[in-house]
Amino acid sequence: TLTIGPLDQRTIKANIKVSSTETGHIFGTIVYENSSTAEKAYINLNDVHLDIMDYIHPHTCTDEAFRLMWAEFEWENKVAINTGMTDLSYFLDYVVKNTNMCCLTPTSALGGKSTFLAANLYAKSIFGEDALVNVSVEKKEDGDGKLSGYIRIRSKTQGIALSLGDRITAVQREGELTKTEDAEAP
């Protein structure tokens, strides 16, 4: 309890503990009582956005554990591949690097001159939540050779699936800009 006089001010610091990534936002409210009327008043604070990259880290698991979790997890976010990149391996490496994921598919299975690539990625949040990703991408055999396909994200909670999907969408856009800038560099 803190009593503040008229036109007085106090600074209060509080530590908060985040126990889940359900929405990627922290909401807060200040509740105080007016001493003369004994009524409670509420001040809603601006929400704080948490970037998924701050709390998700690469992790490994067995193929069997991955398949078991894939079947068990109910939240799925399907993100269409929409990029100007034309190299399958480069695209996969770019997604892995920029989403803090670990590629579970052995590199020996990813090599070769195929026009199709499928890989499983895995990460774990600092809260112990699992994030599973399946990348299924092919190189179109038309004139521009662009990549198409889907990235499917599964998790126990909706928040991780949606946040990771948003991150992957942003990463694809950033990758396209980087490739364009590289091409234009003298």
Image (cartoon, helix red, strand yellow):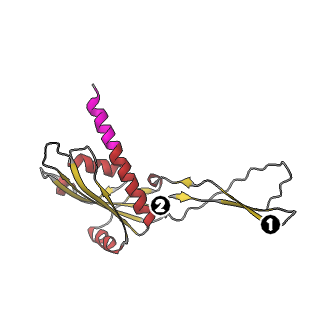
Which three-letter amino acid code belongs to the residue tagged 1?
Glu
- The boundaries of the magenta stretch are 174-185
Query: How many numbered marks, from 0 up?
Result: 2
What residue do we see at 66% from left, 60% from top?
29
Residue 166 lies in quadrant: bottom left
* For residue 169, above or below residue 131: above
Q: CA distance from mark 1 to mark 2?
A: 40 Å
Image position, residue 42 (x, y; %): 71, 61
Q: Is residue 158 left or right of residue 181?
A: right
Answer with mark 1 or mark 2, whichever residue precedes in sequence: 1
| SS majority, magenta | helix
Look at the image and tell me whether residue 99 can be seen: no
Residue 117 lies in quadrant: bottom left
Look at the image and say whether residue 59 sits in the magenta stretch.
Answer: no
Q: Secondary structure at mark 1?
A: loop
Task: Residue under label 2, please give it.
Answer: 126
Task: Residue under label 1, please give it.
Answer: 39
Image position, residue 112 (x, y; %): 13, 51
Image position, residue 5 (x, y; %): 86, 53
Answer few, some or many: residues within 10 Å of disc 2's Cα (few below 14, many 20 plus, some between 14 and 19).
Answer: some
Task: Specify the quadrant that holds the C terminus.
Answer: top left
Look at the image and tell me whether residue 162 can be seen: yes
Which three-letter amino acid code belongs to the residue tagged 2?
Ile
Image position, residue 81 (x, y; %): 28, 53
Q: Is residue 87 left or right of residue 121?
A: left
What residue do we see at 34% from left, 45% from top?
173
